[in-house]
Structure formats: C-alpha cells, structure tokens
Image: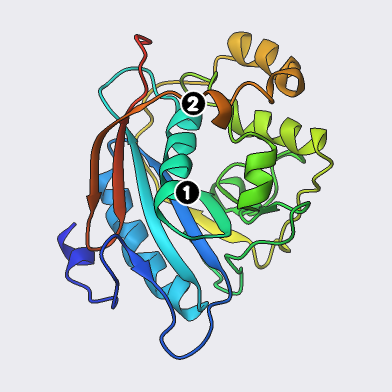
Amino acid sequence: MSKAAGENFNLDPGGHWSPRDCAARSRVIIIIPYRDRLAHLTRWLHHYHPIFQRQLLEYRIVVTEQYGTGTFNKGRIMNAAFLECRKAFQFDCVIFHDVDMLLENDRNMYVCGNDTTPKHLSPAVDKFRYKIVFDNLVGGVLVMTVSLFEEVNGYSNEYWGWGGEDDDMWERFLEVNATVVRPPLAIGRYKMIKHKSRGKEANYTIIDPLLKTSRSRMHHDGLSNSSYRIVYKSSKPLYTHFIFDINTDKS
C-alpha cells in the first residue's frame, strides 16, 4: 500500500477527514467488506480520498475483514463493522462499498437521502456496458441513513459464500416501504477493477429458499443477533481496520 500511504490526504488517524473551513454536507461511514484484495484496496483508497474531500463530506473509511479462511459471510462482517462504528464514532449516514468499484463521475454524491429513500449509487458498471442489470439491484455501492439501516435490522447473517445478502436487503426495504433511488446512468458510472475469479458461483439452491423468508426473518436476523469477536482493530493512516471472528465452523 506504499503508493496510497505516501499520499498526504490531511487525514486524522483511521482514515477520518472533515472540512476545515465549512460545515460538512454529511457525516458518513464508508464500510468496505474485504478479503485478499490488497491491490484493489490500495487503488480504491488512492481513488476515493480526493473525491470525498471534494464532496465536502465528514467521512471515515472502515475496512471490515473476516478472520480465517472459512466460507465468506459478507453480511456478518458488515453488520459487525456497523455495530462497532456506532459505539465509537458519530455519523448519520452509512455506505456499503465493494472494493472493486471505482466511481467515474464525482457528481455522484456520497450523501444520504431521507429515512425512506436508500440510494443505490452504482447502477451503471462498465462490466455490464453501463446498463442496470435488474430492477432490484442494490449491490456495489449502497447508501442509507443510520436509522433506516437499524429499522431493517442490518443485513441478514444467513448468506454464506457468494451472493444473496443484497437481494435480501431489497426485500427488507420493501417490508418497511423504503423506495430505492438511483442517479441517472450518466452519473452513476463505475469501473469494476478486474480480478481473477475464485471459481465460486452463487448457490441458488441455498439462496432462493432464504430469499422467500426474507421478510419474516428480518426482525430476528441481522444486527439484533450479530455474534462476533474483534480479533484486530487498528487506526491506520488511510482507514480504520477491523478483523472479526464471526464464530463459525462453516467451510
């Protein structure tokens, strides 16, 4: 991470920044679920710190990582990061951001709407020819108020491996009558950093039955039953880093 670490972004420890000469547009936590993509993370940090500062945000970058090599559970580590940030920091807007997504147009503002309008900022991705793939897409970059994230009880903890947690979040939004909004495709443009496939596809024989019970599960599956242990926490120069043991023998 030498290239990014060598930049002086005028950050406070932990990847925090706020405007010095004016009020911030919003107080934002950006949570990045991460596993084994150091080159992506380095590029992401170098790309986004200047953008967030141009947008006059008070922001903190938080990298959340799963301990060990077991089956990945993106929802659990995002929930854990949110809960720990809520204890430690002041913020009113939370953004969940994939590490391979690079914004092309910084008129796409990283700020929240109101409590009933979560924002899907990344409808137009180069990999998909800058077209929205399906109507209920909320993966990539998702923005919402803290109160809305708490109302939907965070992400489901039940999706192991690749896929499912974003589709489940869409169902949670429907349950609380929250309407997802998106920027125009000309504004919500992203480049997806290329990476080698891990050879894993979404297992829809597991995902589909879970999605059918999304709404009935949401009040007891999420933030309210998150279970984890903090293995590592560090305020690095460019970001706050958590590693969580999510207490599982899944593999």
- Classify mark 2: helix, strand or loop: loop
Image coordinates for residue 148, horizontal then vertical, percent = 68, 47
SS label for mark 1: helix
The C terminus lies in quadrant: top left
Q: Amino acid at mark 1?
A: Arg
Q: Are marks 2 and 1 in contact (CB under 8 Å)?
A: no
Q: In the displayed structure, does residue 124 sit left or right of residue 228?
A: right
Picture layout, residue 59 above or below residue 208: below
Q: From what the image shows, is residue 4 above or below residue 233?
A: below
Q: Nearer the viewer, residue 190 or 249?
A: 249
Q: Quadrant of residue 189?
A: bottom right
Quadrant of the rendered structure where residue 215 is? top right
User: Mark 2 belongs to which amino acid?
Assistant: Ser
Residue named by callout 1: 86
Q: Which mark is residue 226?
A: 2
Image point (75%, 39%), residue name: 173
State the quadrant of the N terminus: bottom left
Residue 4 in percent (x, y) is at 23, 65
Q: Is any atom of residue 99 visible in this view?
A: no
Along the polypeptide, which appears first: circle 2 or circle 1? 1
Q: How many marks overall?
A: 2
Q: Dividing the picture into quarters, in which one does residue 149 lie?
A: top right
Between the residue at mark 2 and the residue at mark 1, the CA separation in whole angstroms equals 14 Å
Q: Is residue 48 left or right of residue 154?
A: left
Residue at the far right in the pictured view: 177
> Toward the viewer: 36 or 133?
36
Percent position of residue 126, x then y: 55, 53
